[in-house]
Amino acid sequence: MSFLSHLECALCGQVLEADRLWNLCPECGKPLLARYDLEAAGRALTREAIAGRGANLWRYRELLPVRDPRHSLCLGEGWTPLVHAARLGQAVGFDHLYIKDEGLNPTGSFKARGLAVAISRAHELGVRAVSIPSAGNAAGAMSAYAALGGIDAYVFMPRDVPQAFVAECRALGAEVTLVDGLITDCGRVAAEGVREHGRFDVSTLKEPYRLEGKKTMGYELAEQMGWRLPDVIIYPTGGGTGLIGMWKAFEEMEALGWIGGERPRMVTVQSDGCAPMVSAFNQGQEFAEPWQGAKTIAAGLRVPAAVGDFLILRALRESGGTAVAVSDEEIMDAARLIGRTQGNFVCPEGAATLAAFEHLRAQGWIGEEDEVVLFNTGTGLKYTHLWAEAPR
Ligand SMILES: *Cc1c(COP(=O)(O)O)cnc(C)c1O
């Protein structure tokens, strides 16, 4: 049973009824957050009870928004391995390095977490057609869960998106529209279909429940570490759902009495070809300026503007974290190093976390004793075009 109680606007605090469909806050146009009766949940649920449950994110179902489990669409998402990267650690001269490998999720990325929960909840609230503008992985994940739920799926992707992303959506039964431009342009085209055909828009943070799926990375990390947290989390940030979601999970777990007040320092990594959050963080801004001429091999980081920008920046600052930009060349070097030391074919977004680690280590921002978790957010298998030539 879910302890979902209401929705709350992340900026203006407007409170809304949870059991009907919402996109952004009707008052101020910012993201809505799902709120739970954590006191009651803390009394009803123990960490020990969760330990015996299935190896997927629905093990945290009381803290997820789906009320009737018959609507929970499950392809085995979540409960991904947290690996001590010993050989990689040796190569970079640092022992406490861990990789949370999200590439093992259904559809090959952590987007499965967010969309499993968002599409399940949409199914519960009677949605018949869903729409998404996506740089790649989110579209595949939405298509998969929509297929499982018998919901029509409409995908809008940049025309230059790698072929594997298009193929995946088509194979999963979605209608794919290729748009000239970036994800922001796809958003504009998708919005027409939402207005004219009543499709439900599941864009990043434009409905409240993808965040709920992604927050399970925070619950899992704590559970896998024996209900404590690492010193540093490095996360490749596009729309920021994962980072904001984990930060929310830590707050919820403290309210549940499952962890104390300690928090990891949260690090955003972006590509220097599209680094709006790094720029806003460095300039001390509350909101980010849209990035002009976004260009990077890391498709998931090619996000020039994020509706949740203020939430990303808030989490970075409250945690004593930071934001780092790395080059595409550093990303490829890092991907090679992870591949040949750990046997893990990572996506460029995931590789960026190692490149950021190396920057922060060189600056002394990461200390000898820090325990560091890198998030590999997806498999490298959808990016084979980056490996056409033999590595140097
Ligand atoms: C979407 C995506 C990201 C960025 O995720 P956000 O939570 O939106 O910041 C990172 N890596 C991969 C592989 C992605 O698909």
Image (cartoon, helix red, strand yellow):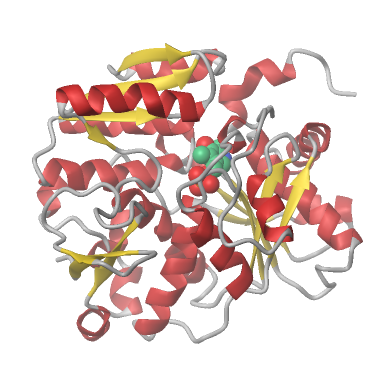
Q: Position of residue 271 (x, y in %)?
A: 71, 39
Most foreground residue, 386 or 275: 275
Taking the image as drawn, is residue 264 in sight? no
Q: Position of residue 42 (x, y in %)?
A: 27, 83
Q: Please state, as top left, top right, bottom left or bottom right, where the N terminus lies in the image.
A: bottom left
**Point 57% across, 14% down: residue:** 160
Q: Please state, as top left, top right, bottom left or bottom right, where the C terminus lies in the image.
A: top right
Tell me the quarter of the picture where residue 179 sits.
Answer: top left
Q: Position of residue 292 (x, y in %)?
A: 66, 32
State left or right for residue 129 relative to residue 379.
left
**Point 85% across, 72% down: residue:** 368
Taking the image as drawn, is residue 253 in sight? yes
State left or right for residue 368 relative to residue 248.
right
Most foreground residue, 99 or 178: 178
Q: Position of residue 17 (x, y in %)?
A: 14, 62
**Depicted 243 relative to depicted 210: above or below:** below
**Point 73% across, 19% down: residue:** 387
Tell me the quarter of the picture where residue 186 sits.
Answer: top left
**Depicted 388 relative to depicted 188: above or below:** above
Q: How many marks?
A: 0
**Point 16% across, 60% down: residue:** 18
